[in-house]
Amino acid sequence: GDIPAMWLRDSTNQILPYARYLNQSEGLTKLFAGLIYRQASQIVSDPFANAHNIDGLTGPSPHTGDATTYPTFGPSRTDAMKPGIFERKYELDSLCAFLKLSRTFYEKTDGSLTQPFLSDTWQAAVTKVLQVFEDMQTSTADDVARPGGAIYQFQRTTSEPTDTLSHGVGNPGMYTGMIRSMFRPSDDATTFPFLVPANAMAVVELRAVAKILRSDAVNATALASRAEKIASEADEGISEHAVMLHRVAGEVYAYEVDGYGNAYFADDANVPSLLSLPYLGYVAADDALYNRTRELVLSPANPWFFKGVAGSGIGGAHTWV
């Protein structure tokens, strides 16, 4: 592409269409396994980074000036923009993309090729993912009250308000069982911290990866139980806090919520999105609640729905079209 970096989400989506041929090509199998290992290594390096550089082959990231830190000891914090990281926008769906790549490989090879999942790196990456999810289930108030402040902080000097976070942590969210996400799959900051489509994706992929972890070959039952618990809590949170009453469409899924009763009714062209919920495996395409939501997001009631003489569809805030 036009950027010398690898996004977790993009690299997964670029290779998934070839998954159907995994049992027909040894080379393709090695490619998938290599990408799983590469993504796992990146997540072990920093689970909050959404994009990484190629080791030793690219220069410093243009985002080295970003103010993003992690807590170390007591009230102290350390700069997180270390070599190898291109951008450190924490996006829930990026970590879900790693889980989806892993489970797709496992399912399409009928569970017969377990070598990628036996590596210490892969299991360490899954552990990091689960820890991030658990940390981001806490309320914003509890998160910022930690001795060193919020676990994840990010600010960027920019003319685009969606390229940075208010006070480094974004808008507040209460505990709901869902997982907070500071940025969307478009790399734009969330308006409210619980991005509903990303949480739906998390529910699906956590339950799928738990099956890998419980397999006889992997036998990581403790990790599987953690994944299943987070999935159940997030799923319950969606049901209790993300199904909202819209003044025109009635009861629908909101795009983002904060747990305090506020909701953002919209959708974005990127996946995961509300429109893509059946593709993600979260609901059936004939689900009544989904279809009311679909009708809403494919209408002028969605601020990012566009219609012209040549066609119509969903755009997004990233390019304002």
Image: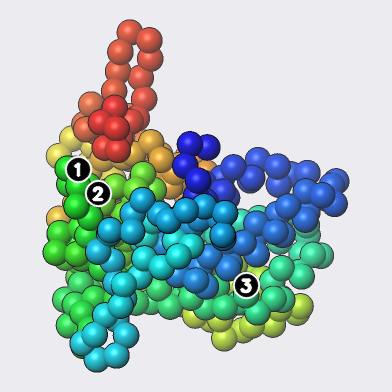
User: Identity of the amino acid at label 2?
Assistant: Asp
Q: Which residue is mark 1?
A: 160
User: Identity of the amino acid at label 3?
Assistant: Trp
Whole-angstrom CA distance, mark 2 to mark 3, is 30 Å
Q: Which residue is mark 3?
A: 122
- x then y, percent, for residue 296: 28, 34
Rendered image quadrant of residue 312: top left
Q: Earlier in the sequence, mark 3 or mark 1?
A: 3
- x then y, percent, for residue 226: 49, 80
13 lies above or below 144: above
Badge 1: few (under 14), some or many (20 or more) residues near its Cα, within 10 Å? few
Rendered image quadrant of residue 318: top left
Q: Earlier in the sequence, mark 2 or mark 3?
A: 3
Badge 3: few (under 14), some or many (20 or more) residues near its Cα, within 10 Å? many
223 lies above or below 105: below
Position of residue 139 in the picture relative to residue 229 (left or right)? left
Position of residue 251 in the picture relative to residue 179 (left or right)? left
Marks 2 and 1 in Cβ contact (< 8 Å): yes
Whole-angstrom CA distance, mark 2 to mark 1, is 5 Å
- Furthest-top residue in view? 309
Q: Secondary structure at mark 1?
A: loop
Q: Which residue is mark 2?
A: 163
Q: Secondary structure at mark 3?
A: helix
- Furthest-bottom residue in view? 74
Dot in front, 3 or 1:
1
Badge 2: few (under 14), some or many (20 or more) residues near its Cα, within 10 Å? some
Quarter in which the C terminus is drawn = top left
Whole-angstrom CA distance, mark 3 to mark 1, is 36 Å
- x then y, percent, for residue 198: 40, 55
Residue at 15% x, 55% y is: 262
